[in-house]
Amino acid sequence: QMTQSPSSLSASVGDRVTITCRTSQTIFNYLNWYQQKPGEAPKLLIYAASTQQSGVPSRFSGSGSGTRFTLTISSLQPEDFATYYCQQSYNSWTFGQGTKVEIK
Amino acid sequence: QLQLQESGPGLVKPSETLSLTCSVSGGSISTDIYYWAWIRQSPGTGLDWIASIYYSGYTYYSPSLKSRVTISIDTARNQFSLKMKSMTAADTAVYFCVRRLVRTEIDVFDMWGQGTKVTVSS
């Protein structure tokens, strides 16, 4: 069971944004984060909880282990308004319900 | 640069079988650190993993879909495919073919096709 929060948030350009993903049992570091824009496929941002995918801006970072994980965007940019998903790969493969980041 | 491209019908009638193919270009489907997967997305259920396959033919299925789904791979054509039988309106979704990277302490869907929308309707 994965619980992602919040389900949506409103923020301004330049804001620091944090999204949380919790699991009911430990998944060690088998946690990945994706960004999805309307009409597009999800794009990998962070894998193994904290490793940035090549080409991803440094403002995106991931942390956590066990059952609690966070995705942080240090300074929100206009192109970051999108929906973000966590996904675990320890016990089968499941996704969080998503966090929609909207313009304030 | 690796690319994945889904192909198949956009409309399927209830009770019929859906057949989708993913063509992989820019890299070999037989690379040993990669598995290949189908994932679907609908407004009601979000992102759902359906099945995965290795180039050797080893398969994994979602327990909730296992009875209706078959995933297969054609290494000569660099393609893999999905068949889902007994389609219902609940199977209406965008279907993505995806590459899954597996290494020590890493298991991630790192490359995605653009997705193909499948509607189940008579």
Image (spheres, rainbow, N blue to C red):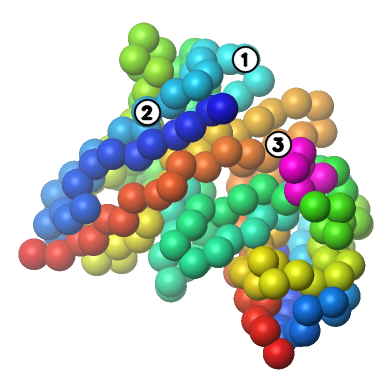
User: Same chain, marks 2 and 3?
Assistant: yes
Three-letter amino acid code at the position of disc 2: Ser
The Cα–Cα distance between marks 3 and 1, rounded to whole angstroms, is 13 Å
The x and y percentages for residue B6 are 35, 39
Which badge, 3 or 1, comes first in the chain's sequence? 1
- Per the image, label 2 sits on a secondary structure element best described as strand
The x and y percentages for residue B1 are 56, 27
Q: Which residue position holds label 3? A: B107
Three-letter amino acid code at the position of disc 1: Asp
The Cα–Cα distance between marks 2 and 1, rounded to whole angstroms, is 18 Å
Which badge, 2 or 1, comes first in the chain's sequence? 2
Residue A68 in view in this figure: yes
Q: Is residue B49 above or below residue A2?
A: above
Instruction: Provide the major secondary structure of the magenta segment.
Output: loop
- Per the image, label 3 sits on a secondary structure element best described as strand
The x and y percentages for residue A28 are 86, 47
Q: Residues within 10 Å of mark 1 (few under 14, many from 20)?
A: few
User: Same chain, marks 2 and 1?
Assistant: yes
Three-letter amino acid code at the position of disc 3: Asp
Q: Which residue position holds label 2? A: B23
Q: Which residues are magenta?
A: A52-56
Residue that appears at 34% across and 50% down: B116
